[in-house]
Amino acid sequence: MKDKGLKIVTIGGGSSYTPELMEGFIKRYHELPVEEIWLVDIEEGKEKLEIVGSLARRMVEKARLPIKVHLTLDRKEALKDADFVTTQIRVGLLEARAKDERIPMKYGVLGQETNGAGGFFKALRTIPVILEICEEMESLCPDAWLINFTNPAGMITEAVLRHSRIQKVVGLCNVPIGMEMGAAQILGVDASRLRIDFAGLNHLVYGLDVFVDGISVKERLLSLLTERKDTVAMKNIHAMGWEPAFLKALDLFPCPYHTYYYKTKDMLEKDWEASKNVGTRAEVVKSLEKSLFELYKDPELCDKPPQLEQRGGAYYSDAACRLIHSIYTDKRDIQPVNTRNNGAIMGIPADSAVEVSCVITREGPKPIAFGELPIAVQGLVQTIKSFERITIDAAINGDYNQAHLALTINPLIGSDRLAKQILDEMLEVHKAYLPNFFIDRSNL
């Protein structure tokens, strides 16, 4: 890796999240000498790319830094000789996400961006595109690190690890850092003093222990959560407290996405009510993004606006830029990321991606070995890992039977009949983005 003049490429550069990322690079410039940032998008995202790209240039100009911001629709031009490639793409845009959310609800099951049927179809659409990017990286920037933000981040990371030659890949999610910030707030301490031992899967990660100044405070945190019926919430998930007896017996710090598994009926009712009154999350986000991009157009705006936090991407800049900075400087600090398991969690295949606390080095994340997960959560984690692995295979092979099996395994579906009905309808509505499933194999 170069000692100076880093080239960073962001695929999906027209995203509303990009100002958050730019802020992170600007704040760390004295330790992370970025020379070029290439923001890449597709034709349908050209207008947003130009709007957010202009804001990015104003942010750099205000900071008086010698960072060149390039905007392009030519992915290959951008990737050449890159040092870090970040991906934040949405195949099918928000229209596809809205279908992921609404159609499953017709069948009485949850539709959500990364969980259940919604996350399943997002993975089917996204994995082939990510693997195309990896093929281009192999020839244009084979030594670059791929930092993937694209959801479902765990499945995307595992698909790259198992089905591409790009092995310098790390999946990143803002849930763990949000849990750290939320725990610090509940405990009334500065977040810099707090650390959590994370282990599990993306959007199914648990805090095994919580430390302040190196001393375990997990019992105190769980007690406060129980007493207040408090929770660590996210903008895109309905906040619900936990039943005291459940939380006490679990004896772990759950992430916000656990509500989909431990409060399935309650979450379905909330999502159904919201879809009727304010729209699905995709429809709400579409409105939020419209407002954000109107703000971004303001030629006087030179900073990330606070309204971006409503988008649900809080702490992405800290998580992403902290990770890139630690790899670049060989910092060897501890961060939760999605990486190859390699025995960190027993009962999960070694080549699978897990979300776990890691020591971040120049050679990449070194996962901390936690052994077996507590018996109370081990089964759920293994079930979701089975779902993920079969989903990845279905996405790559365009295999209808594997897709049906994966959906049936997912505990949020709960029926092979429902799985088939949902699969058939959603394959048809997403047909344009799922060419693998519509190849005539009779002559192959």
Image (cartoon, rainbow, N blue to C red):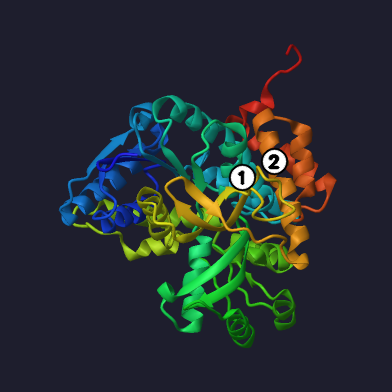
Q: Quadrant of the image for the N terminus?
A: top left
Given residues 253 and 108, the one toward you in this image is 253
Identify the image quadrant of residue 403. Answer: top right
- Identify the residue shown where x is 22% and y is 57%: 301
Residue 373, compared with residue 140, is above or below; it is: below
Q: Residues within 10 Å of mark 1 (few under 14, many from 20)?
A: many
Distance of label 2 from label 1 (alpha carbons):
8 Å
Which amino acid, by three-letter code, is at mark 1? Met
Give residue 11's position: percent from left, percent from top: 41, 39
**SS label for mark 1:** helix
Query: What percent of the width, then of the height, locates residue 296?
Result: 29, 53
Q: Residue furthest bottom?
A: 227
> On the rendered structure, is 292 left or right of 56?
right
- Compared with 198, 107 (above or below) is above
Residue position for label 1:
155
Front in this rendered view, residue 39 or 183: 183
Is 406 in front, or is 437? Answer: 406
Q: Are marks 2 and 1 in contact (CB under 8 Å)?
A: yes
Q: Could you tell me if residue 276 is visible in this image? A: no
Q: Which mark is residue 312?
A: none
Is residue 340 shown above or below 243?
A: above
Q: Which percent across, then down, holds residue 3?
A: 28, 43
Where is residue 124 shown, x and y percent of the image?
63, 38
Residue denoted by label 2: 391
